[in-house]
Amino acid sequence: MFKVLQGMRIIEASAFVAAPLGGMTLSQMGADVIRFDPVGGGMDSRRWPITKEGKSLYWVGLNKGKRSLAIDASKPQAQELLTRLITEPGEGKGIFLTNFPASKGWMSYESLKKHRKDLIMVNLIGSSDGTSAVDYTVNCACGFPYVTGTHHSDPKAKPVNHVLPAWDAIAGINLALAVLAAERHRRLTGEGQLVKIALSDIAFAMTANLGYVSEVQINQEDRKGYGNYLYGAYGNDYETKDGRRLYIVVVTDRMWTELAKVTQLTDTFKEMETRLGKNFKKEGDRFLASDEISVPIRQWCSQRTLKEIEGIFQNTGVCWGPYRTFKQMVEEDPRVSTQNPMFSMVEQPSIGSYLVPGSPIDFGAFTREPPNPAPILGQHTDEILAKDLGLDAGTIKTLRDAGIVAGPVEIS
């Protein structure tokens, strides 16, 4: 089966979320991604969540389909081997992706470029001002914790951190995009380049794209927290008769009409419009009347079970979704199952069989392949040294005996 990025090879040195995600995104589209890590495992090798036996589900989740090289990069001989691997000539090669500090030393762009002039290096850094940053420190700096959580009318409201590393996720996709853009530029011009992306720039750019920066500067207003209300439109959460929760969203006139119809609240909402002097065909007016609109919907939901509501909403124009824990999501949602062609049951070495997603991108011109498991640390060490670098068995044994390379290595 042909993959869209077949023939492209990326060498990855990474940790945390963004850079491994960038590499995995390319791997799942067919690129050959070789990740190198310390002989005993890097800082992600034991990161939570873990199995009862201490195996990192985090690590295997972000490294599916890659090849793994375990090597002691602190040793000069290892640095020479890695330099050869990163700068090896050939079409589709000479691409290096990392989020490690790489402004000096053997791993810097200037040092590596001496061995391949058209080298592509994509480097994720923390902040554009040179300071360190991770997703959670960037997030708290760009305002979102103050509009997350309780309603601004709560006198005890305080900033609430998110648990989804959203900026890391967006950065990972941007890293993959940067690799593809730089590789296209090289094919057209023959030129390589150093591409830098700051995690803080990812967050501040998206914050500005969503209007939060201009809102402050043009309107001279600071965004308030609205709890679970959807800012600027209508959306709220509701509890059902059986103690479950759901979220209802209205962002079009049809959604509004359908919601009023199936809940039999059309007349109630018309009376409310007259009383409040609002026009609920206008998205902004629905937002301003969120508290009032929510009262009859809350009562309607409280009189029905989640299953009953699902039946009523089915095949209508109502936009809604049930709240689910991770466990409920896995057990209840058919989209998180093999019914969804993105998912397959995959046997992950040393962990077991479970649902694993492939790329969420469905290229119609190519057959969608099941995902490959993540490698064991150093699983491909000998293969990479022999096939990619052309070393003989005796040389590889010498490197192993000297502790320069290793693998496969079971992390526990």
Image (cartoon, rainbow, N blue to C red):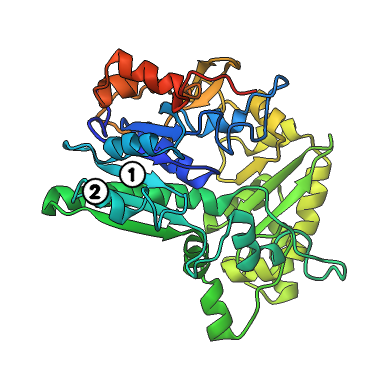
Q: Earlier in the sequence, mark 2 or mark 1?
A: 1
Instruction: Residue type at mark 2: give it.
Output: Leu
- Residue lying at 39% horizontally and 57% vertically, measured from the top left: 104
Q: Quadrant of the N terminus?
A: top left
- Residue lying at 66% horizontally and 63% vertically, measured from the top left: 140
Q: Position of residue 129 (x, y in %)?
A: 49, 70
Q: Nearer the viewer, residue 392 or 176?
A: 392
**Res. 138 mark:** none
Q: Position of residue 292 (x, y in %)?
A: 77, 64
Instruction: Residue type at mark 1: give it.
Output: Phe
Question: Does residue 36 sit above or below 109 in this rendering?
Answer: above
Task: Tell me the residue that label 2 is attached to.
Answer: 119
- Residue lying at 70% horizontally and 19% vertically, measured from the top left: 53
Q: Position of residue 110 (x, y in %)?
A: 29, 56
Q: Quick check: 66 left or right of 251?
A: left
Task: Tell me the residue that label 1 is attached to.
Answer: 96
Asked if the residues shown at circle 2 and circle 1 are in contact, with their CB atoms under 8 angstroms apart, the answer is yes
Q: Secondary structure at mark 2?
A: loop
Q: Nearer the viewer, residue 293 or 132?
A: 132
Image quarter of residue 240? top right
